[in-house]
Image (tube, rainbow, N blue to C red):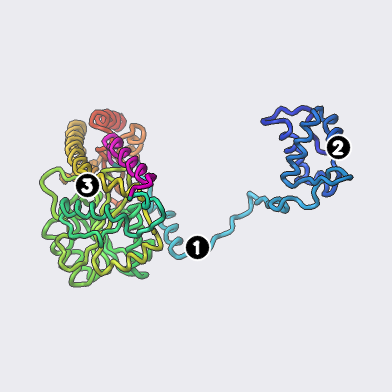
Amino acid sequence: MLIDRLELPAAFNGDGPVSKQIAECLRQGIIDGLVSPNIILPSVREMAVQLGVSRSTAARAIEELSAQGYVVAEMGSGTKVAARLPGELEEKPSVRDEHAPLKEVELSAFARRLMSRQASGAISTLVSYNGPSLKDVPLGIWRDLIARHCRAGVEVDSSSASQLSYAPEPFGYPPLREAYASYLTRARAVKVNAERLVVFASRNLRLDLIARLLLSEGDLVAVEEPGFSTAREQLLARGATVLPIGVDSQGMKVDELIAAGPVKLIYVTPSHQEPTGAVLSMIRRKQLLDYAAKCGAYIIEDDYDSEFRYDGRPLPSLQGMDSSDRVIYLSCLWNVLAPVTRLGFMVLPAGMVQAVHACKSLVERDVSYIEQAALSDFINEGHLEKLIRQKRQVYASCRQSLISKLESIFDRQIWTAPESAGLELLVRFQDGFDSQTIESAALQSGFPITNTSWWYFGNPRPLEYTISFTWLGEEEMAKRLEHFASLLSA
């Protein structure tokens, strides 16, 4: 009997209506080949008797199979299995042998370099989260600004309504570019107008785009040693030859760079060097600009963390001091407004505007209008600079509290960097500690400490760490530090 061959259950207790359960059992039997094409099925009455269900239930099951294309009703001859199954099931998908070796993919040179660096351990995961305090983010204001532009976008008579339609502008929303250009002029003495300012959905794309446009295979790029690992890895992945230049308390050693000869590109973080916290001195800023002008190099000035300097006024940007138009300026608000926005910004030399426009039109044609419009209002209404002032005051207190607590607990067993900027504090443990014990204690206690080895291109400095002091608050930080110290002394 056909029903017996299909091994339909005597009672249907699964999910959903009984008719659907019957249809599914029949469908699976057809797919598995238990019923050949063109075989005539039992009548609705016979199926109902054999399964112990009502005729209407059996009829609905057949109707569902017919609608899916598995059975065909023909006048005078009953219902039979379709000669041709639905297209997507004509061929069963092949099942890969789990023990068979994976077929190797032919990767590009870019991908091979990237995978090689990852396998070597050069691209690492941080021990701890490192970033701004989330509790200080003005979510209420941001929500209201987002809502404002959402409402404007659906109002028929609103001039903003057309902005929600697809109208790509590769360089970003013009009002935001105007607002951010004005902010950079006020805060960082950057020489900029909206035509030379570019908005990115993510800060990570900026350097990669510049590398595509300016670097050929093997071109020499100077970077700080130690320095921001992600930037270095992006340059290496694009085929650059990296030239590590040492760093001291005055930032990049420009004399060392000059002695090395001409390079194509210089990546530098003059406002707050990672991980040392050093600020590039005024003398070295002038030396670096003179060197770039003489050898025809471009300087990529990553001004990350420039907002948070706790002693004295910040030095002006390299871009603002440049008279040769050799500086590409990078800025973002991640350390101020994460996670509500991760937009990145770039200020271009005049000679690069057309090339960047052409490239960005391909790799990132447009950025969320709503996010850009909200940020534009956030800046124009004074919220950004107010927030930075508030955070600077809070973070300065957190930093000093951490230093005092470290000195109280460890005395001379730990050295703390004197540089007063950024969101992290550089520390070095003295002899008598080992990195494995330190990192194990940090993981157990949740103390936000990070080994600086990932910042080094060459041999890392032993027992050197950064401590993020911004996201826990003074009381919680003190509690975790005490737990961390107790584990070290156990």
Element marked by disc 2: loop
Q: In the image, residue 6 lies at what x, y percent?
A: 81, 38
User: Which disc, if any, is residue 43?
Assistant: 2
- Is 274 left, or right, of 362 in this rendering? left
Task: Between residue 389 and residue 292, name the one nearer to us.
Answer: 389
Q: In the image, residue 114 lies at what x, y percent?
A: 42, 58
Q: Is residue 169 visible?
A: yes
- Is 281 left, or right, of 8 in this rendering? left
- The relative height of residue 427 versus residue 363 in the rendered view (above or below) is above
**Of the residues tagged 1 and 2, which is closer to the observer?**
2
- The relative height of residue 165 versus residue 383 in the rendered view (above or below) is below
Q: Amino acid at mark 2?
A: Ser
Q: Amino acid at mark 3?
A: Asn
Kindly check if marks 1 and 3 are in contact, taking CB atoms under 8 A apart as contact: no
Q: Residue at x 35, y 70 (%)?
A: 216
Q: Earlier in the sequence, mark 2 or mark 3?
A: 2
User: What span is colored magenta in the figure?
Assistant: 132-158
| Residue under numbered circle 3 | 380
User: Which disc, if any, is residue 409?
Assistant: none
Q: Is residue 226 visible?
A: no
